[in-house]
């Protein structure tokens, strides 16, 4: 049978097993390295670069020679455009009210300062000629969301500094990339034999015209593409299962169209498109954001693996003491000067300036641009261009390692981040929730509340609680609510379906283990199969079978909050380090309580969730809702999380503010 008659044979003729193996290897290494980075709390880019270098030049699993072709640069360029579009979707224009001037200065004045000082460092420390030194300085002006956003997610700094870093990291990529391309075009123009007569003034004019065209083309293409996508989504011209593919198609088309009209303007076009789509009021972009976040993980992993795997072992010869000095110049001199000059006259405090001065890791755009430029400049600078890519990769590794391992401790030292945030965000602010929130706040822990009911919000604020009116299902709630210092979300909404949607919504920011949902279904409803599946809900709040109605009924009948610990005459076993709920149930049968929180002897706050995980050590205390008059419920099925304790086991509790709390606290 001929190849034409056998399509399967024809496919394999064009896609050999080695290529399929390479593609699979890249995906496995990219995702696996990011999982290891999450597991051991390390910067993911370090492991991605290491995995790519080992798979490429060291072990030859991926052939560096095969990765030198033009298709790689096209794939990298388009992938970066998609990544910047996803980053733009996270930017809200309302965030710029207080920090807009700082962001503007960082992506203009800061870029110029970094470019100038980086150029001087490359010329005097790395012995590059002026032409290549200027180009290296331009390439290293970029940071990028692929490195900044993961660091911010890991550190979770407070207030304005997080907003400034996020905006700078996303918007500086297209600015730096366009600058680097214009510098490259100028160098090629000056070095072309037929253009020897071109003077510096003509080159400067070329750069100015190129910059203006890039901005004009990017704005026009992004506005047209965004308008087209909004019309398609608003008029429901595509079914739900095609919304994300259609979005991806339009983003790719906008990127290519912009690049065809003006080289490298596509990155700016996709970034503006993301920002415009995120801030328009006509259609929801939540499902698009979720799709792009998943796609970004795959793209970032693949890009870093591919770019580091294409390095040659000979590249290591360029890494010497002068490169380390250049790296130190960028970290200790260039970045601080750029930040302090850019933030002069802005409302940023000195601690915020110090943190921003220590946050400029280079990422995928620098790696991609350096690899592409080295390919184009090799015929013109054959002696020096070999050091371009190794130096840039050394800066990427050095800055990611430096900032990734030290920015977190610095933020905590500057009191801009909490090492283990203990604060609670209550979604819902009715009477009994406010009672619980006040009690936890009096114990010394940060508490914040959100509610759609303005009366609940006003009463919360009148009682000294931090509360604001917000819809837990709103797209803007994650950006509008200050989540600094908040470690866990407690959803106390008397509607099972709405509470489940809120849990899914907050999973964009919080780990699933830190989202708790109080059941609104009674045991009767659960037995009748009306309970939502576990994967659609948060963790059980205050116990697996404690419901909203249980607590509301207890409070209505006069239940109060108390701080407990084991009494001195509790029968202890020296060999036993802790006691479970069932241990205590066997000993005390005077009062019915519902445990809510545990305050460990270390000062950390834990939330009672799964009953079998509830343990109490002799030095620990816990907060419980106590019904003095007997069982809190007359239902035939008792609450499995109700326990009985001796009343004389209620000591006075001194919180971190030095105030003594009585054993019994009225609502």
Image (cartoon, helix red, strand yellow):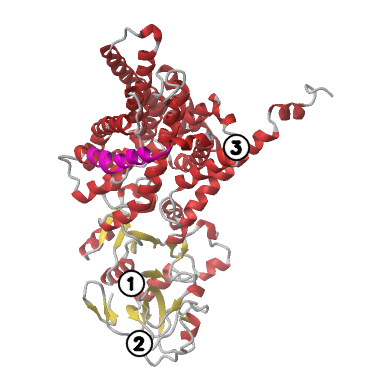
Instruction: Give neighbour class at mark 3: few <14, some 14-19, many 20+ (Cα, 10 Å).
Output: many
Give, as a single range, the part of the protein colored magenta: 319-338
Magenta stretch mostly in which secondary structure? helix
Asked if residue 88 lies left or right of residue 315, the reply is left
In front: mark 2 or mark 3? 3
- In the displayed structure, would residue 228 be above or below residue 354? above
Name the disc covering residue 603, or none.
1
Residue at x 44% of width, y 82% of height: 643
Q: In this view of the protein, can residue 453 be seen by the observer? A: no
Could you tell me how far apart the alpha carbons at marks 2 and 1 are, in whole angstroms? 20 Å
Q: How many marks?
A: 3
Give the distance between the C-alpha atoms of the residues marked 3 and 1, in whole angstroms: 50 Å
Q: SS of the residue at dot 2? A: helix
Label 2 to label 3, Cα distance in Å?
66 Å
Q: Position of residue 451 (x, y in %)?
A: 32, 56
Foreground residue among 581 and 192? 192
Tell me what residue is drawn at x 21 percent, y 75 percent: 658
Q: Quadrant of the C terminus?
A: bottom left
Residue under circle 2? 649
Mark number for residue 62? 3
368 falls in the magenta region: no
Say above or below: 40 vs 19: below
């Amino acid at each position: 049978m001929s190849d034409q008659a056998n399509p399967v044979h024809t496919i394999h003729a064009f896609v050999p097993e080695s290529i399929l193996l390479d593609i699979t290897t890249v995906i496995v290494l990219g995702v696996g390295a990011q999982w290891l980075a999450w597991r051991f709390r390390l910067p993911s880019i370090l492991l991605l670069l290491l995995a790519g270098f080992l798979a490429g030049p060291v072990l030859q699993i991926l052939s560096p020679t095969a990765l030198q072709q033009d298709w790689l640069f096209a794939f990298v360029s388009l992938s970066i455009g998609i990544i910047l579009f996803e980053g733009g979707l996270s930017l809200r224009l309302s965030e710029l009210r207080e920090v807009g001037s700082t962001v503007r200065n960082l992506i203009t004045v800061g870029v110029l300062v970094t470019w100038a000082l980086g150029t001087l460092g490359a010329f005097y420390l790395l012995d590059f000629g002026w032409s290549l030194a200027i180009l290296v300085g331009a390439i290293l002006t970029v940071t990028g969301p692929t490195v900044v956003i993961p660091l911010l997610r890991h550190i979770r700094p407070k207030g304005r500094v997080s907003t400034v870093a996020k905006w700078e990291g996303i918007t500086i990529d297209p600015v730096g990339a366009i600058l680097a391309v214009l510098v490259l075009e100028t160098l090629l123009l000056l070095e072309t034999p037929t253009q020897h007569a071109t003077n510096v003034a003509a080159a400067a004019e070329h750069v100015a015209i190129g910059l203006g065209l890039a901005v004009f083309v990017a704005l026009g293409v992004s506005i047209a593409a965004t308008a087209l996508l909004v019309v398609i989504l608003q008029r429901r011209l595509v079914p739900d299962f095609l919304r994300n593919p259609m979005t991806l198609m339009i983003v790719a088309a906008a990127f290519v169209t912009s690049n065809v009209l003006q080289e490298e303007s596509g990155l700016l076009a996709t970034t503006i498109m993301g920002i415009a789509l995120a801030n328009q009021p006509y259609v929801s972009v939540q499902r698009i954001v979720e799709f792009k976040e998943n796609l970004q993980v795959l793209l970032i992993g693949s890009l870093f693996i591919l770019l580091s795997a294409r390095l040659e072992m000979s590249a290591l010869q360029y890494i010497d003491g002068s490169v380390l000095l250049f790296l130190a110049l960028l970290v200790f001199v260039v970045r601080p000067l750029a930040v302090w000059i850019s933030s002069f006259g802005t409302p940023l405090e000195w601690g915020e300036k110090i943190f921003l001065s220590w946050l400029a890791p280079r990422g995928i755009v620098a790696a991609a641009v350096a690899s592409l430029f080295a390919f184009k400049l090799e015929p013109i600078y054959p002696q020096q261009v070999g050091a371009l890519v190794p130096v840039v990769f050394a800066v990427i590794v050095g800055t990611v390692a430096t900032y990734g391992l030290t920015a977190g401790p610095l933020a905590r030292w500057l009191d801009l981040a909490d090492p283990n945030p203990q604060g609670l965000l209550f979604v819902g602010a009715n009477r009994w929730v406010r009672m619980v929130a006040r009690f936890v706040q009096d114990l010394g822990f940060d508490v914040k509340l959100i509610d759609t009911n303005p009366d609940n919000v006003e009463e919360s604020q009148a009682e000294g609680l931090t509360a604001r009116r917000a819809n837990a299902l709103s797209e803007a709630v994650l950006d509008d609510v200050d989540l600094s210092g908040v470690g866990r979300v407690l959803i106390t909404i008397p509607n099972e379906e709405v509470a489940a949607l809120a849990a899914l919504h907050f999973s964009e920011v919080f780990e699933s283990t830190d989202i708790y949902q109080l059941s609104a279904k009674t045991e009767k409803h659960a037995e009748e199969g009306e309970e939502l599946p576990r994967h659609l809900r948060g963790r059980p709040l205050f116990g697996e079978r404690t419901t909203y109605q249980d607590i509301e009924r207890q409070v209505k009948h006069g239940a109060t909050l108390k701080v407990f610990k084991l009494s001195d005459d509790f029968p202890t076993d020296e060999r036993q380090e802790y006691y479970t709920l069932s241990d205590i149930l066997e000993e005390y049968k005077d009062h019915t309580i519902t445990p809510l929180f545990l305050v460990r002897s270390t000062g950390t706050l834990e939330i009672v969730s799964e009953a079998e995980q509830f343990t109490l050590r002799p030095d620990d205390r816990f907060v419980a809702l106590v019904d003095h008059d007997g069982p809190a419920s007359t239902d035939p099925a008792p609450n499995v999380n109700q326990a009985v304790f001796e009343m004389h086991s209620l000591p006075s509790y001194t919180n971190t503010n030095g105030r003594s709390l009585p054993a019994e606290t009225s609502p």
